[in-house]
Structure formats: structure tokens, C-alpha cells
Amino acid sequence: MKPVTTLRRGMDPGPSLKSTHPAAARWIGTLIRMTSAHPGMTRILDVVERLSDRPYRTNFVLLGEPGTGKEGLGRALANLTSPAGPLVRYDVAGFPEDEALALLCGAGRRGGVAEAADGGSILIEEAAGLPARVQAALLRLLKTGRCERLGAAAVNSPDDDERPGDKSKRWDVRVVAMSDRDLLAEIATGRFRHDLYHRLARVVLTLPPLRERKDDIGPAVIWMGNRILRQARVPLDLMGAEDFNVASREEKRRAIAVDPEAIVTLEQHTWPGNFRELEAVLERALLLYREGDRLRAEAISAALQNGEIGS
């Protein structure tokens, strides 16, 4: 996946990240080859496939419960629509408004996210929580390409795009805005700008929760399980993915072996933490409770019951 810059308080963005990580192509390829019985996921996969054939730079809003995979999808979309540009993550949860604004636009001699993402994309964590002045500055950035550093003459008003003689720099950015909350409901309560929403929501995708995607659990277990074992440096010499829709012959050859009863046990769980919880359960099951060359239902049950080691 493309490297992501995360700017924090007091950090200078430094040089823009222009390279595309090789894992990005593999992850996008996995998305394209995936199938899903859920209509919402079918639509998302169709969008990914279309963009892979005809890349088009635009803004996205990604909605869904925590753990449904918004960040992974956001990174894939940014890579497809701006493959040569940087991807900069913007997360200001808990920041005072002035600091959040400075992180977006810069302050003094220090540039901000808008400058660091020039030619690429900004990945916004929890867009519903953006302070009012940040929303105004982001709207102006999307309308005019301008986002003056704090202390400049401009006030980052979204309505000052026609100031005579303005020679400030313009940044060419697209935005992938993620939210756990319904942004239309936030608009109705006055917490989110409707004009900003319509600038962002050129493509709106809602990721369904895992409890609605029971048929997708089997393929997800194979894909996640292989990744967990690879990261833990466990040899991938196990066999047995013939019963699942694994993306490629290579993945089938190297796939972990999972008993059907283990999949049934996973399907019966409600998954309040969605894929993030599934990954944690699989890691415990594979690294702590797996016996021999197969992942059995007993290991899954033990991992589900023991959210903390020693509990």
C-alpha cells in the first residue's frame, strides 16, 4: 500500500511522498478479484474495478462502523485516483481548533497537510468531528486550492475565493473523508456543513458491518490468516483453501487450513468490532491456540473467550 504520512502537532510535513508501495497493487488486485454476497460490497467492488480501468481523480466519503475497513479502502481509492501523488493522513481528534487548523493549512514557516498532499490525496479520519473553522478551511481548499497558513492575511473563509490580487499558492488535492457517523444526520443537527458535504460526497460508499457479511467470513479468514502468519514469520506451508473463494492460485497453495466447523463458529459471532475484531481473534487463535497444521473450532472458541491473555 502507498506510504501514508501522518502529520502531528509540531511536525513539518517534509518532502512529499511520491512513490507507490508495491503492496498497494496487490491489495487493490485482491479487492478487484473479491466477490461478496452483500449488495453494498458488490457496489464498492464495482467502483474499485471501474477506477482500476479508468482512473479518475475525485473526492470520496466512506461511511461505516469502526473496524469495517474504511482506511484500507480509502488508501486503495487514493492510490487508484492519484497513483503518483502523496497520501497524507489527517486525524485531529481531541485537538484544539487552532491546532487542527494549523495542521491542515500550516502556521508560520511550517507547512500543513494541504501542502504535503499537493498532487495527491488527504485521508481524513472521522470527518464528522472536524471543528467549524477547519470545515470552512477545507471547503475553501476544495473550491479554490488555497489554504493559507495561520498568521497570513487571509482568514480561510470559504467565501473569499475572488479576492483581487490574491497570489497565494494553490494546492491540487483530493480528499477521502471517513466517518463512523451519518454525515447527513450531522448536517441536520448543524454540526457539519452541507456545502462541504456536497464537495466531498462526489462518491459515497458505505461499508456494511461484518455481521451482515457472514458469507464473506471464510475468504476473509484465509486472507487475514495468511497475513498474520507471514507477519509473525510462521512458515506458510499449510494447505487447504479449496472450499473458499481465495483470490489466486498462489494464495490457495500457501493458504492456512481451516476446518468448516471453525468457520461456522466465526459466523455465529456478532462481531461488534467488525474486521478489526476478527483479525484480533484470528491472531490469538493462530498464534496461541492452533494445534498442528489446522485451525480448528476449539481454537476459535478459545480465542473468542479469551480477549485478554490470562483472562
Image: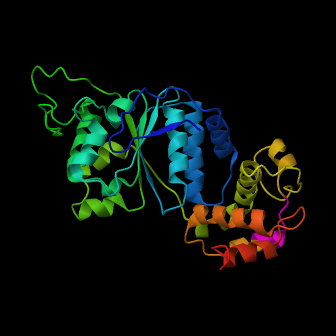
Instruction: Compare residues 146 and 184 and report the one nearer the observer.
Output: 146
Magenta range: 257-263
Instruction: Compare residues 303 and 33 and report the one nearer the observer.
Output: 303
Relative height, residue 169 to residue 217 (above, below): above
Classify residue 122 as left or right of residue 238: left
Residue 67, x across and y down, in percent: 54, 61
Q: Name the residue at 23% across, 37% down.
A: 140
How is this picture coloured? rainbow
Q: Name the residue at 50% across, 45% down.
A: 74
Q: How many labels does the image show?
A: 0
Q: In which quarter of the image is the C terminus?
A: bottom right
Residue 173, quarter of picture: top left
Residue 118, x across and y down, in percent: 38, 28
Relative height, residue 225 to residue 134 (above, below): below
Classify residue 51 as left or right of residue 111: right
Residue 163, x across and y down, in percent: 11, 27
In the displayed orientation, state which residue is furthest to the left: 164
